[in-house]
Amino acid sequence: MHTYKPFIIVSGPSGSGKTTTVDIIIEEYGGYVDRIVTCTTRDQRPHEIAAKDYHYLTREEFLAIKSDNGFVETSERKGNLYGTRMRDIEPIWDAGKIPIAAIDQVGVACYRALFPGSLSLGLMPARMDELAPRIQELRPGGTAKDTAERLALAGEEFLLLCENADFIIAAPTGKVPSMVKRMMMLIKHYKTYGKTF
């Protein structure tokens, strides 16, 4: 029987479907897992919901929490701060569920060091040329330069994903239900037996 605190990481490059996939897993299998809502200083997007997608903080609020050691991890991307508070994780464990986090690949190593025995699931499109339309759909106001930067980063993230993920799952466009089914098979095994794959 595993004695560590269980934790699930879902990672992948921008446009890989990690956030959408985690949303579906929570909606259909909420008895097993619950999402960690992280903090950010970036602006809230029109489709996002406060306290569901992120806790939106001012930079001053974020730095005050950080100075009080309130974050278990922090990162900065494109001038915006991101962080995870332990107080947002512990209630999930207390409810008998597994915390699940959808994060960029750069944060995976940090989470794995913080939570030994965590299950890391990496998502990648079946073909890299599928990423550009997905990125543009997710960020309709984005520029061509922003899309190009995210595509370049995706190649680097794929190499990190190969190093850090326990399982790499193909995420072809339009095949989310079958992908979620494969992920839940792994999650159910992990919840029952720990990391004994």
Image: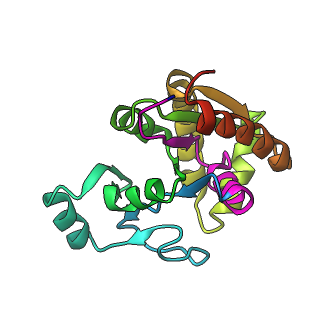
- The x, y position of residue 105, in whole percent, is 49, 38
- Judge left or right: residue 79 versus residue 192: left
Residue range of the region highlighted in magenta in the rendering: 2-29
Give the side of residue 76 with respect to residue 18, left or right. Answer: left
Count how many numbered circles sit on residues in the image.
0
Res. 48 in view = yes
Q: Is residue 50 magenta?
A: no
Residue 80: tell me if it is visible.
no
Q: Residue at x 48, y 30 (%)?
A: 2
The colour scheme used here is rainbow
Q: Quadrant of the C terminus?
A: top right
Against 183, is 51 above or below? below
Residue 163, percent from left and from top? 51, 21
Q: Nearer the viewer, residue 26 or 16?
A: 26
**131 or 24: nearer the viewer:** 24
Residue 24 position within the rendered picture, expressed as x and y whole percent measured from the top left: 72, 58
Residue 2 versus residue 32 in the image, above or below = above
